[in-house]
Amino acid sequence: MFDSILKMNEAALQILLVTDASGKLIGIITDGDIRRAMLKGVNFYIPVSEVMNTAPLSLPTGSSVVQAKTIMRQHSIRHVPLIDKCGRVQDLIIWTDCFENVPKEQKEKIIIMAGGKGTRLDPFTKILPKPMIPLGDKPIVEIIMDKFHQQGFRNFVLSLGYKAEIVKMYFAESDRRPYSVDYICEDHPLGTAGPLSLHRNHINDTFVVTNCDVILELNYLDLIRYHREKRNMLTIVGSVKEFTIPYGVLKTEGQKLLNIDEKPNLHFLVNTGLYVLEPAVLDLIGDDEKIDMTELFRRIELDKGKIGVYPHHGKWFDIGQWEEYRETLRFFEGNVMEWSI
């Protein structure tokens, strides 16, 4: 399954077609299949046959776009393989081939937590606040907003603190954007969740919170749909992260050696710093209270609120530390930033 995640991310179509050696279609794996498997906590090294849909809908080669649109609407699917008389894959019709892909304007506000000092990026952040760190010809915070705007989001609020005036000055000098940018400033550090209390009187619907140093290749509309369908009070976006232990790991029974696992790869679902929340969460934070996200999670659970996890397996860049920033720069230097959704 882990190999399929890598291939799906590379193809950027949210689907993989599984064939036998002759090219005959034997199953499909979608983004949703991967996400459901991750939520079940399955082993990342299980065969794809345990994850895939073994009876996928398809159309014969030569079928029209009209036929594809009909089957997509009837069955609420976004991809239709075209197969020949022997069942071999010849083509794939996707949703955007059939329907105009113009994003609908979304009402949800996007709060970007941009008030921290970014000490892990010293000495860079002694001069610039972390949200203004450049990637190409734009600061990271603007790239984040552009990614949201591509999917119809137009209302952004920057939660500022450290060197707030630099951020405000940048956006004031270049205000010809197709979305609105507002600001709320903390007078003193309030932790990773405390600044949300400053938004209490400005939020009355589901909203999104993101750190200012993360970029995700993510369908935000699907994330919000998932959040509402699960009736969560807060949804955490969790991403697959691979860690390699650079040593041979010993498995023992008492003093007896059972096995040596040489430089094993481990996979974890880790917090990306992107959340969807309901307004009721804000009532759990006191005015001017310093509180971190982990404590907010605990309060939601004590309040009988539901916290869910949305598994993400696409690209995820976290520039909060130097090595990650360097890797992100290398990626952007060699790739187009308009990722597929």
Image (spheres, rainbow, N blue to C red):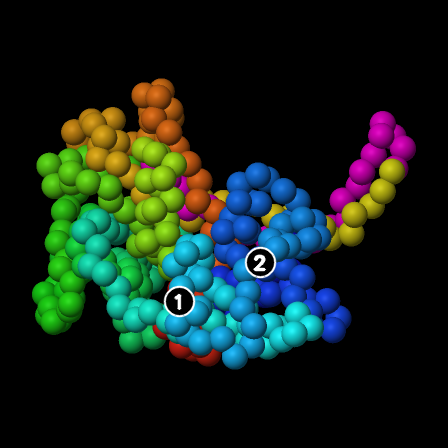
Q: Nearer the viewer, residue 149 or 297?
A: 149
Q: Residue 236, position in %: x, y?
A: 40, 42
- Residue at 64% x, 54% y is 54
**For the residue carrying disc 1, how many other residues have a C-alpha within 10 Å: few (<14), some (14-19), or many (20+)?**
many
Task: Give the extent of the magenta segment.
Answer: 234-257
x and y, in percent, of residue 96 in the image: 38, 70
User: Which numbered marker is on residue 69?
Assistant: 1
Amino acid carrying mark 2 in the image:
Pro
Residue 152 in magenta stretch: no
Looking at the image, which is closer to me, 238 or 248? 238
Q: Quadrant of residue 91?
A: bottom right
Against 71, residue 193 (above or below) is above
Q: Is residue 167 left or right of residue 217?
A: left
Residue at image position (50%, 56%) is 31
On whether residue 235 falls in the magenta region, the answer is yes
Residue 15 can be seen, yes or no: yes
Instruction: Give SS at disc 1.
Output: helix
At x 65%, y 66%, the residue is: 25
Q: Which residue position holds label 2? A: 56
**What kind of element bears circle 2?**
loop
Question: Which kind of residue does numbered mark 1 sit on?
Answer: Lys
Q: How many marks?
A: 2
Give the percent coordinates (x, y) of residue 164.
17, 54
**Which residue occupies 37% across, 29% down?**
306
Q: How far, Cα to Cα, is label 2 from label 1? A: 16 Å
Q: Is residue 315 visible?
A: no
